[in-house]
Structures are given as structure tokens and as C-alpha cells.
Image (cartoon, rainbow, N blue to C red):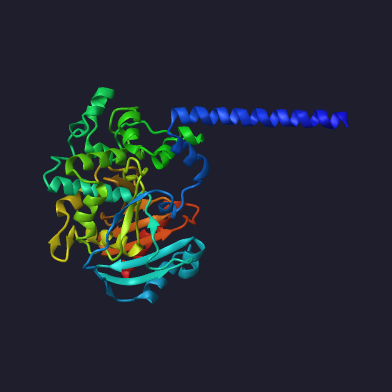
Amino acid sequence: MKTLVKLGKIILWVAVSLAGIIGLFLLVMCIIFPPEFVLRCLFSGAETVYDYKIFPERKLEASKNPYTYKSQPDEARVKAIFEANPKIKNLETFLTDTGTQAFIVIQDDAILYEQYFNGAQRDTLVTSFSTAKSFDSTLIGLAIEDGLIRSVDDPITDYLPELVERDPRFQQITLSNLMMMASGIRYVETDIPFFDDGNRTYRFPDMRRLALKMTKIAALPGEFVYNPYNPLLIGLVLERVTGKTVTQYLQEKLWTPLGMEYGGSWSLDSDKTGYEKMESGLNARAIDFAKFGSLFLKQGNWNGVQVIPAEWVAEATTPDETAKLDDKVYYKYFWWGLYREDQGYDYFAWGNLGQFIYISPTHHLVIVRNGERYGLEGEGIEWAEIFYQFANDFGKK
């Protein structure tokens, strides 16, 4: 009996000691970081397409004159071409099994295929993850067109001068460097949630502070490093030059002019600071994401109105040597791209878990895929290859 009592005391002592260590660690973390960030790291779990539910948001209003695509269903042809790919035996089964929610194929202004899976439907809202970044760079192009920004070659310190006080090397970083993911700003992924830069840029409750006071420079601009700090700084520039929230500017310049059928939102870092999660937090429906793709397919022209300058569409998406990542893939102004064998190129907005707006100018196609998970071993690049092959085969028929 005495042995059991002694053992119980030891277990209690160990438990109390562990609780004290954990409590002390959390106390230290709450001193170093905002308590809200610590709580998010502990309890929010892995990212999901439903994360718009856990962050505060700023609303986007549906257009009073919604644009409607022409309906020209060609499901049999679309299915046959996809199913010619050895990875896909049955398109609907494949899309269901990979966790797909929405799948839309558009040629020019006509919907050829539009289906929803795994409980989703046309009005299902999802968060875009990094698909939002392609909207970010487009807003920079529009701010240049509005005369609010001189050039993508402007140093970011022209608009965020306080960065010079922290490190004069910020003067060497241009807006173009940010949008090319080549700023030289430090970005490190670790297995320690509190010290992982990806975790910070996703969960931090004061992203203005994060971008302006906590970013550090690791190298001279020029080398590609996929880095969510870059779009945070882009958002700050947009706020400064427009005098509006990023959501307001998006509503005015794109959401209303494109006739978005549904409202949407942009997730915020917190209620207190109210800054858009520029790296990931644009929330919308698949059919409205498709309109953004169609706008680029049509060189920025929407129903006879030049919403985005055609020159910007070309500058933002056309590959060059500075954008080349390897013989197949390039990255330009927050867009991913694939070189085509015919010297052309496809490009796409790509978000975590397989959110895609894929554009093939050669074949006049837009493909939108939203999903709860990638569902493929090759993850995002495997989806891009599937879209690429479909566009190839579609063009031959």
C-alpha cells in the first residue's frame, strides 16, 4: 500500500512539474508573441477551405448586375478528354475521390462543364489560399493604371519609408521583387509552430506589425523563394496609395465591374487591426473565381470595357528569363505558369489544398477547381499537369 501511495505521489509530482513547464512555456510565448497568436497555434489545427469561418472578415458585395456565362454544355467531350488521361478512369469518380468541391471548364464565354462534389454546390464558399495572391498583383497593376504607383520598379520604401530605419537594404527591394517572390526577405519553415514563418503569416493577429517590424532580410533581391511576407507588404502599399482597404479597392476595381454573382469576403488578421490576409484570405464561389480567369483570358477586356490594361495582363503572365524556375515551370507576378511545347504558355493561380484558376490562352480555356484537399500524390503540380494535358488534347479535337 505504501508503495502505491509513493508511486501516486511521484506521478502527481511529474504531472504537476510537466504542467508547470508547459504553463511557463506558454507564458513566455505570450510575452514574446500576441496571446491570440499563441491560442491560434494551439487550437486552430491544420488549414482547411473552411477557415473563413474562424477569422474575422471584410465583406464583398455581389454585383447588382451579375454577369452570366453562356451555357453550352459539352460534358461528354470534356469527360472523354479527361478520361483519356491514364490517371482518370471516370471523371466524376476521380473528382469525388480527390476531395474536389467545384470543377468548371469554360471556353471563351461559355460553360462546357460545371459540376459540384462532396456536398458542395454553386453557392458554396471557400477560401482561396494563395489564389488570392494573383488578385493582389492585379490590384497593383490597377493602382499603376490609376496613377497611384509609378512603376513595378519602384523601391518599396517609396511607399513604406519606415522600413529604411530598420534596415537600409529594404531600399533595394522593388515591387517587382515582391511579386516575383525574389525579395531576399528571410523565410524559414520549421516544425516549431511559434517560430515557423509560414505559421506566422497565416495566423498572426497583427500582420501590419509582422510585415513592417518583424521581417528580416536574408539576401540581396533576385533569388526565387516562395514567401508569404511579400504579399503582406504588397497589401500595405495598396492601403497607402489608395487610402482604402484592400477589400474596398477590390470591390471597386474588379468585383463590381466583373458582375460577380455572389458576395464574398476577405479574411482579416484580427478584429482589432482589420488587415486583410493578403497571402491567402480571399473567399468566394468557384463561378466568380472563373470570371477573374476569364478576364485575363480576354486580355483584361470585359464586355467591351478594358477593366485591366492589356499591357498589364501581358507583363504579369508572359514568361521571361527572370521568371523561369526550370524547363517547364515559371513564376511571374504571383502567377504560376507552364511552358507549352508550341512556344506558348499556360498560367494559373494556385492555392493550398488544390484551389486553381487555370488559363490556357492558346486553347481559350479557363478551368477552375476548388477542393478540400489535393487528393493526388503530386499535389498541385500534378493537377496543373492534368489541366495542361486536357488543354493539349482539347485543342486537337
Q: Which quarter of the image is occupied by the N terminus?
A: top right
For the point 49% across and 60% down, which residue is it? 98
For residue 238, side relative to residue 353 (left or right): left
Q: Position of residue 314 (x, y in %)?
A: 19, 51
In the depicted view, which residue is nearer to us: 12 or 169?
12
The answer to which image quadrant residue 231 occupies is: top left
For the C terminus, the image quarter is bottom left
Nearest the eye: 89 or 4: 4
Residue 188 image point, x, y percent: 42, 33
At 32% from the left and 45% from the top, the residue drawn is 278
Task: From the top left corner, tell me how far across and down residue 35 is, in percent.
Answer: 45, 35
Marks counted in the figure total: 0
Whether residue 232 is situated above or below residue 117 in the rendered picture: above
**Residue 326 visible, this orientation:** yes
Q: Taking 86 as reference, is 7 above or below it?
A: above
Q: Residue most toward the left?
A: 147
Q: Is residue 70 above or below residue 238?
A: below
Residue 336 appearing in the image: no
In the picture, measured across the screen, residue 232 lies left or right of residue 39, that is: left
Residue 219 found in image quarter: top left
Residue placed at 44% from the left, 55% from the top? 50
Specify the farthest residue to the right. 1
Position of residue 80 measured from the top left corner of the image (x, y, whole percent) = 41, 72
| Residue at 48% over, 62% down | 87
